[in-house]
Image (cartoon, rainbow, N blue to C red):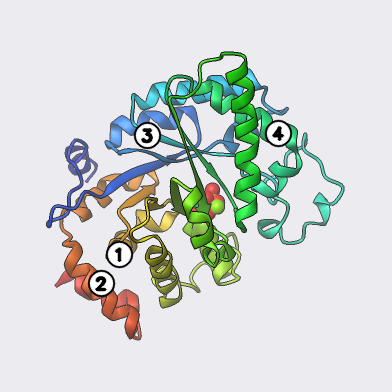
Amino acid sequence: KQAAYAKLRDVEPFTRDGERIEVMMNAGLRDDMSMLAVTGADGIGLYRTEFQFLVSAALPQRERQARLYRDVLDAAKGKKVVFRTVDIGGDKQLPYISSENAKEDENPAMGWRALRLALEREGLMKVQARALLEGSAGRELNVMFPMVSEPWEFDAAKEVFDSQLAYLKKRKHQLPSCINYGVMLEVPSLAEQLDLLLPRLKFISIGTNDLTQFLFAADRANPMLAERYDWLSPSILRFLARVVQTCVGQPVDLGVCGEMGGRRLEALALIGLGIRRLSITPAAVGQIKELVRKVDTKEIGDAMRGWLASPPPDMRAALTEWAEA
Ligand code: PEP
Ligand code: MG
């Protein structure tokens, strides 16, 4: 099977009706970058920068961060890389970032994490912003903010980048050739104000891992709940359909970067909803490319519209049947 996927490495994922689906991969370590060539993925749709922080005994210095970002871009050889700013805190506690209240975080996934923490620890955010700007000198920089729950959080985070950019400009440092800012949509509250934030965004990436846990109020790390809620539940699909609807006709790139996109039926459902960019675990790239080539976007789009309007008793069974027909 691996050999079959290797054959797909250089094949562009076009659907039967000629739609190009972007199949990107998620990464978090410099070593992951070798998988780009192995899988033939279109780029890195989610680079989890917190990995460097998690493996360090102290807050990574700016030069070290910048070197990593530069190395990642070098390894990408011109393919797109989306850097997500740190998603630490919550259950990913770091000894060198302390909070008086950290130990009282009884619901760490919903706690003081990601942007919530980064905006309060200005030093951390400023240093990462500078490192990302310096590491991308002369090249395109794509920055994505995690756990944005309300539009002002995006503005506050971008402001940190703007002031670092102004600093570098004043000192005549080489700047990135272009900077694109986007958000992860993984907290349901953002969806209700997405139209308001949209004009300021270049891209949105739906993080279905966290989104699902928040939508169902079901801890993604609790094995007792792992089988209870299905990614193909009408609750999720209708939610995603509304997000897609909000973005239709807007100059914003919409994709999905959660694990959902790496599974065949789920990817099929996402394409049916109108998603055209997936960022998934490297191991799934081959099989998702293979799936894309069998899909007709109009057919699955029509089927999905019907299922959303009147959901079948078992969406998974309906999709399986459709896929096998
Ligand atoms: C997500 O939440 O779906 C996601 C892609 O980010 P992470 O798994 O790192 O929380
Ligand atoms: Mg997440």
Q: CA distance from mark 4 to mark 3?
A: 25 Å
Amino acid type, label 4:
Leu
Taking the image as shown, residue 302 lies to the left or right of residue 65, namely left
Query: What residue sits 62% from the left and 47% below the top?
Result: 155
Q: Position of residue 107 (x, y in %)?
A: 72, 61
Determine the residue located farthest toward the top in the rendered image: 172
Q: Is residue 282 visible?
A: no
Q: Are marks 1 and 2 in contact (CB under 8 Å)?
A: yes
Give the labeled residue for mark 3: 80
> Disc 3 to disc 2, how far (Cα)?
33 Å
Q: Amino acid at mark 1?
A: Leu
- Figure check: 232 above or below 79: below
Mark 2 closeness class: few <14, some 14–19, many ≥20 residues within 10 Å: few
N-terminal label among 4 and 2: 4
Q: Disc 1 marks which residue?
A: 265
First in sequence: mark 1 vs mark 3: 3
Q: Between residues 138 and 206, which one lies in front from this camera angle?
A: 138
Packing grade of label 4 (10 A; few <14, some 14-19, many >=20) is some
Residue at 30% in and 30% down: 37
Q: Secondary structure at mark 3?
A: strand
What's the CA distance linking mark 1 and mark 3?
A: 26 Å
In the image, 325 versus 241, the foreground residue is 241
Q: CA distance from mark 1 to mark 4?
A: 40 Å
Mark 2: which secondary structure?
helix
Q: Are marks 3 and 2 in contact (CB under 8 Å)?
A: no
